[in-house]
Image (spheres, rainbow, N blue to C red):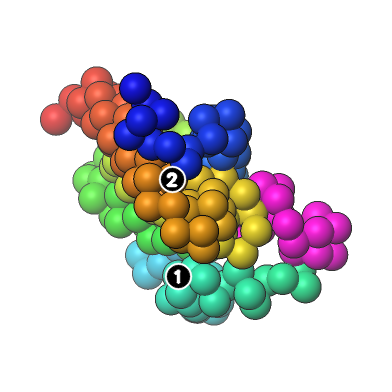
Amino acid sequence: MLEKWFPNVDWAMMWQATEETLYMTGVSVVATFILGLILGLLLFLTSKGNLWENKFIYSIVAAVVNIFRSIPFIILIVLLIPFTKALVGTIIGANAAFPALIIGAGPFYARMVEIGLREIDKGVIEAAKAMGAKTSTIIWKVLIPESLPALVSGITVTAISLVSYTAMAGVIGAGGLGNLAYLDGFQRNHNDVTLVATIIVLIIVFVIQFIGDFITSKIDKR
């Protein structure tokens, strides 16, 4: 039945491409969460009126975040080719996509982290400071727990963006569903291959959104 409706689809290749997309997305989400959380905390803590208030450091971090957040992803991939080749040794394959994926998504998530932290009631932070809590304690016991629903919601949105980023990375040889849809679908005029790859990408996005919404609803006590 499937062969009748999708005669040009190689299901073994489609499954391999799906695994590559899931691999690229999964590793990138974890790395982006860590990088974005660090940058977001720096932005929040060094901003005016906060624990590490420092205009110079805040300006530098904000500039880096704004620059990399503003560069279109397809251009970023090209700009990072020398860096990627030096770091990974190749510009082809799933592993070669990681530098661009992480550098592209990290600053985007950092801003979402900063926004989530700014929503915390300042009275809670002041109470922790009045009790003599160290900065590290405030970060781990107040800032992160209080902003956790926003952090999860933010990484859900970022993960969905990363799925689309992997598709774009695939066009220049990173593998995954984007690569298959472009090479075997578009270039060979196999519309059924492109359609199936698109449907699988949509399923991945819906699953990520469902998981993110479920976790957010469980941890949001408001």
Residue at the image point whose x is 50% and y is 46% from the top: 177
Most prominent secondary structure in the magenta stretch?
helix
**Eyeballing the image, is 212 above or below 164?**
above
**Residue tagged 2:** 193
Query: Residue 30 appears at what percent x and percent y?
Result: 55, 39
Residue pictured at 47% horizontal, 41% vertical: 8
Q: Earlier in the sequence, mark 1 or mark 2?
A: 1
| Magenta-tinted stretch | 84-103
State whether residue 53 is above or below residue 94: below
Distance (Cα) linking label 1 and label 2? 32 Å
Q: Nearer the viewer, residue 207 or 28?
A: 207
The three-letter amino acid code for the residue at tag 2 is Val
Numbered marks: total: 2
Residue visible at 80% across and 64% down? 85
Dot 2: few (<14), some (14–19), or many (≥20) neighbours within 10 Å? many
Find numbered disc 2 in the image and state the secondary structure of the residue it sits on.
Answer: helix
Residue 50 position within the rendered picture, expressed as x and y whole percent measured from the top left: 39, 60
Residue 96 sits inside the magenta stretch: yes
- Is the N terminus in the top left, top right, bottom left or bottom right quadrant? top left
Residue 213, position as x, y percentages in the image = 24, 31
Quadrant in which the C terminus is drawn? top left
Residue 22: horizontal and vertical position, in percent? 52, 36
* 88 or 186, nearer to the observer: 186
Q: Quadrant of residue 97?
A: bottom right
Between 181 and 31, the residue placed more toward the observer is 181
Which residue position holds label 1?
69
